[in-house]
Structure formats: structure tokens, C-alpha cells
Image (tube, helix red, strand yellow):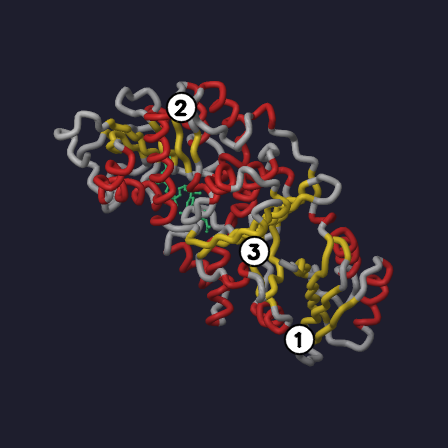
């Protein structure tokens, strides 16, 4: 099957590639370097026939001499020698949105890594996919090195999922683990993550938790059959964490991880939240290091299921894009497509949502205070008034001139109580900043 002349049955899938950055150039390289393997496994030769990026003269380490260069992404849609568009430009708006919309409207397939686009416009695009019988694949959008979309949509499809917890942002995990191992500071490590191709074009999406949120809504839709809806999410990033938090969490037998969680509450609502959390060292998620991603799910029949792999960077992301292209090649030969979010769009319900206020459990609270007599006496009535019981209290350092950290861990309470108490504590005269509040997970 490896030579088209010997096998007249070999089909061709022609790709229009929009975006030639980390992921686009990586996709091009895999399709070239593993061309024979891909053809053997699918009976289809997958070739890039046309490309688009902003800068035509940039050296991308790939040979573009045999492909058509078009000036605007949308020009790819109507090219007769393009069967599928791979959208790897990024951004929730145009040109990615109009390219994906226009391609699906024409009944052509789309493969994308663009989680922001799907988090904001997933419902509309799922409907266009269904109406036009045009596949929309997005394995690369969440944890590229882990086939998590396939796992939820196919492998675990027989289960009711009750909880999903994920480390879904390689940049943040890289920052947190590197800070912990080396004591280097936040900005310096973020710079490394950008150079390694992990970070988004706008890295505030990574460190502010937005990127994890984009991915979480897609996994929630697949897990719970609900409409992907980014507005339904509580999102907090890692930008307020200090090296002290990491050290103190260690003393509590935990590590701090940016966790996206989608949990079905007893009343049927879905709690979707991204937040740095204390994760017990006994949990597999606590040992997901560097730029790796990890996802822990609970299904009613399968029980707990944990997967780990590289979720950022050229190789794993492009690998997922090409896997989608290979699925598409097989689909063209033999079958029907699965709906974008696992169920037909009209069956996806608006999720009755819960917020961070509804999260129940123990919390870590760090306060930055003047080290003066009576500070604890100011704080404890506020906690008492909100029925928050203290499990432990630590003060680090002793200084009349410098602010000091007080860390409180609580017994079980609600996110709402902690939020309301924090708002009051922040106003106390000896408290110098808004308290940092992190849920302590028991997973
Ligand atoms: P890059 O910034 O490296 O690449 C973006 C590419 O899109 C560039 O080639 C750029 O052109 C092109 N582009 C941007 N805007 C336009 C435009 N208006 N018209 C034409 N071309 C345009 O991003 P990545 O490759 O890192 O990411 C691409 C997508 O993949 C994003 O959606 C991202 O969220 C997603 N993703 C990325 C991962 C990663 O680890 N990097 C992992 C998972 C998903 P030019 O090169 O000329 O500037
Ligand atoms: N910026 C993202 C991350 C890329 O760091 O995980 C992968 O989606």
C-alpha cells in the first residue's frame, strides 16, 4: 500500500492547513515524516495541498515549495483540491471562526486544536456539523498527548461520569513544578514555557486559568451531555500563588496544582470550576509534573480512570491533529460520523450550573498581615460568623516591619462561606491583601 503506483486503491485526503506555527508546522512534519505509516494504517495518502499564515517569508523549517500559498484563510474553503481544513491559527473570533463556520457550511470537514473557539462557539459549530454532515474533530484541543476526547466520546461512553478532575494546562504545571523544584520565580519560568512553545499567544490565558476553562467546558459537554458554555465557569489562575504557598502545601502533605473540575452534584447541577487546589500527595494527579497533563475521571461502571501524557507543544498537539485526519480518512472509507459532543445537538441540555460558591470541602487560606498583637482576634470572629471552623493555623516569620503570612486550613465548609468571609477579612486594618483561598481536594 505504500506506493500509489502499485496500489490503485490508495485514496488521497487533501489538507488545507491554516496556521503554520508550532502546531501547524508540526502537523506538516508528521505528515511528511510518517507518510508511509499513515498510508499503511488508513489506506489513504494524507497530503497538505494548500497553506495559509500571516508571514510568507518566515522560515518554518518545512518545505512549502509544493503547496499552494493562499493569502487569506477563508480562501482555503473553496479550493477544489482541499477536502479538509486544519485550523491551527488560534483565537475564538475571526479568522478562525469564519473559516470553521464557512468550511462546515460547505459540508467539508474541519480538524482544529482551537479550544477557545469551541468553548465560545461549540454549540453553533456542532449544529453546523450536524446540519451539513461535516465532521468537526478536535482531539488536539485538550491534552493532545492523551486521547481524552476519544476516551470520553467512545471508550467510556457507556458510563455515567460523576466527576472529572484535570491538570489541563502544561504551561501552568510547568511553572508550578519548576518553581517547586528550583525556587525560580514565576516570570522567569513563564518565559521558558513560552520559548518551549507551550504557552498561548496571550499567556494570560494560561496563567489566568482561561485556557484550562476552555478545555474543561469541552470535557464537561462530553461527560454530561450538556451544552459547552464558557460563561458557566468559575475560573481562577495561578498568578497569585507564591513560593511560600507551595512550601506550606508540602507540609500539609499536598502539592498545589491548577485543577479543572467538572463534578455532578447531588441535586443534578454540574459544578465547573478552575482553581489552584491542594492535591494530596496520595493522588496520582499530585505526581503529574512539568508540562504533562493528567485527567482523573469516575464512571459508574468503570470506576476511577486516570490518564497522563504531554498536553502542550508541537509534537503531542500535532500528533492529535494527524490522528484526527487519520480517523477522517477511515470515516470516508467506511462510516458515519459521531456527533461533535457525543450526542446530537438537540439532545444537549443547557447544564443547570453550580458555581465555586457551591464547592463543599476543606480550604487553605493565606493571609498577608501586619505582625501585630490582636490580628488573629480580628480574623477569628469573621470566621465564626460564617460558621467556618479552623483546622490549623500557621504563622511564618516574625517581623514588626515586614508583612507576614498566616495560613489557615479549615474544616469542611462551602465556597460561599469562604468568599463572604474573605471579602470581610480583606477590609480588616491589619490585613494587607485579599486572602488567597484554595480548595483542598480529597481525590
Ligand atoms: P502559533 O502562534 O505558534 O501559530 C499560529 C499560526 O497561525 C501562525 O503560523 C500564524 O502565522 C497563523 N495566523 C495567526 N493569525 C492569522 C491570520 N489572521 N491569518 C493567517 N494566519 C494566521 O500558535 P500554536 O501553533 O501554538 O497554536 C495554534 C492553535 O493550537 C491555537 O488554537 C492553540 O490554542 C492550539 N493549541 C496549541 C498548543 C501548543 O502547545 N502550542 C497545544 C494545544 C492547542 P505566522 O506564523 O505567519 O505569524
Ligand atoms: N497553552 C496550552 C498549555 C497549550 O500550556 O497547556 C496546550 O493546550
Pointer 2 residue: 103
Mark 3 lies on residue: 258
Helix, strand or loop under label 2: helix
> Is residue 437 in view from this perspective?
yes
Instruction: Tell me, for residue 402, which label it has, or none.
Output: 1
Please name whichever residue, 57 or 358, is drawn nearer the observer in this view of the structure. Answer: 358
Kindly state the secondary structure of the residue where label 1 is placed: loop
256 relative to 334, above or below: below
- Residue 118: mark in rendering: none
Horizontal side, residue 243 vs residue 29: left or right: right
Instruction: Residue at 45%, 61% (x, y): give it.
Output: 290
Quadrant where the image shows the N terminus: top left
Residue 154 image position (x, y, % from top left): 48, 37
187 displayed left or right of 161: left
Disc 1 + disc 2, Cβ < 8 Å: no
Question: Marks 3 and 2: in contact by CB < 8 Å?
Answer: no
| Nearer-N-terminus badge (2/3) | 2
Residue 395 or residue 290, whichever sits in front: 290
Question: Residue at horizontal 48%, vertical 52%?
Answer: 307
Q: Is mark 3 within 8 Å of ligand 2?
A: no
Which of 334/12 is in front? 334
> What x and y, as percent, mark residue 22?
34, 46
Q: Position of residue 299 (x, y in %)?
A: 59, 46
Amino acid at each position: 500500500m505504500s506506493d500509489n503506483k502499485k496500489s490503485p486503491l490508495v485514496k488521497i485526503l487533501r489538507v488545507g492547513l491554516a496556521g503554520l506555527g508550532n502546531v501547524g508546522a508540526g502537523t506538516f512534519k508528521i505528515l511528511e515524516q510518517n507518510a508511509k505509516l499513515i498510508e499503511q494504517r488508513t489506506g489513504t495518502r494524507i497530503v497538505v495541498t494548500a497553506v495559509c499564515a500571516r508571514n510568507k517569508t518566515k522560515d518554518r523549517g518545512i518545505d512549502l515549495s509544493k503547496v499552494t500559498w493562499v493569502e487569506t484563510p477563508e480562501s482555503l474553503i473553496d479550493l477544489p483540491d482541499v477536502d479538509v481544513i486544519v485550523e491551527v491559527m488560534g483565537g475564538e473570533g475571526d479568522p478562525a471562526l469564519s473559516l470553521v463556520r464557512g468550511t462546515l457550511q460547505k459540508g467539508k470537514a474541519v480538524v482544529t486544536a482551537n479550544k477557545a473557539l469551541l468553548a465560545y462557539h461549540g454549540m453553533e459549530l456542532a449544529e453546523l456539523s450536524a446540519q451539513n454532515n461535516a465532521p468537526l474533530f478536535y482531539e488536539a484541543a485538550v491534552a493532545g498527548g492523551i486521547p481524552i476526547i476519544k476516551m470520553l466520546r467512545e471508550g467510556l461512553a457507556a458510563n455515567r461520569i460523576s466527576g472529572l478532575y484535570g491538570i489541563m494546562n502544561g504551561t501552568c504545571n510547568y511553572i508550578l513544578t519548576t518553581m517547586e523544584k528550583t525556587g525560580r520565580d514565576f516570570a522567569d519560568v513563564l518565559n521558558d514555557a513560552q520559548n518551549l512553545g507551550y504557552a498561548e499567544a496571550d499567556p494570560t490565558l494560561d496563567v489566568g486559568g482561561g485556557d484550562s476553562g476552555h478545555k474543561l467546558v469541552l470535557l464537561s459537554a462530553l461527560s454530561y451531555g450538556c451544552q459547552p458554555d464558557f460563561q458557566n465557569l468559575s475560573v481562577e489562575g495561578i498568578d497569585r500563588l507564591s513560593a511560600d504557598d507551595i512550601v506550606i502545601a508540602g507540609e500539609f502533605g499536598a502539592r498545589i496544582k491548577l485543577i479543572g473540575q467538572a463534578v455532578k452534584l447531588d441535586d443534578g447541577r454540574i459544578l465547573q470550576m478552575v482553581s489552584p487546589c491542594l492535591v494530596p500527595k496520595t493522588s496520582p494527579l499530585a505526581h503529574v509534573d512539568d508540562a504533562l497533563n493528567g485527567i482523573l475521571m469516575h464512571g459508574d461502571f468503570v470506576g476511577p480512570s486516570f490518564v497522563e501524557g504531554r498536553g502542550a507543544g508541537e509534537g503531542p498537539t500535532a500528533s492529535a491533529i494527524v490522528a484526527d485526519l487519520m480517523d477522517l480518512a477511515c470515516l470516508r472509507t467506511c462510516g458515519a460520523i459521531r456527533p461533535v459532543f457525543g450526542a446530537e445537538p438537540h439532545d444537549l441540555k443547557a447544564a443547570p450550573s453550580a458555581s465555586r460558591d457551591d464547592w463543599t470541602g476543606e480550604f487553605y487560606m493565606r493571609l498577608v498581615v501586619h505582625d501585630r498583637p490582636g490580628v488573629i482576634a480580628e480574623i477569628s470572629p469573621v470566621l465564626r460568623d460564617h460558621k467556618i471552623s479552623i483546622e490549623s493555623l500557621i504563622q511564618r516569620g516574625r517581623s514588626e516591619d515586614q508583612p507576614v503570612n498566616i495560613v489557615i486550613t479549615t474544616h469542611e465548609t462551602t465556597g460561599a462561606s469562604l468568599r463572604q468571609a474573605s471579602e470581610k477579612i480583606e477590609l480588616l486594618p491589619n490585613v494587607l491583601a485579599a486572602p488567597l483561598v484554595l480548595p483542598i481536594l480529597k481525590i
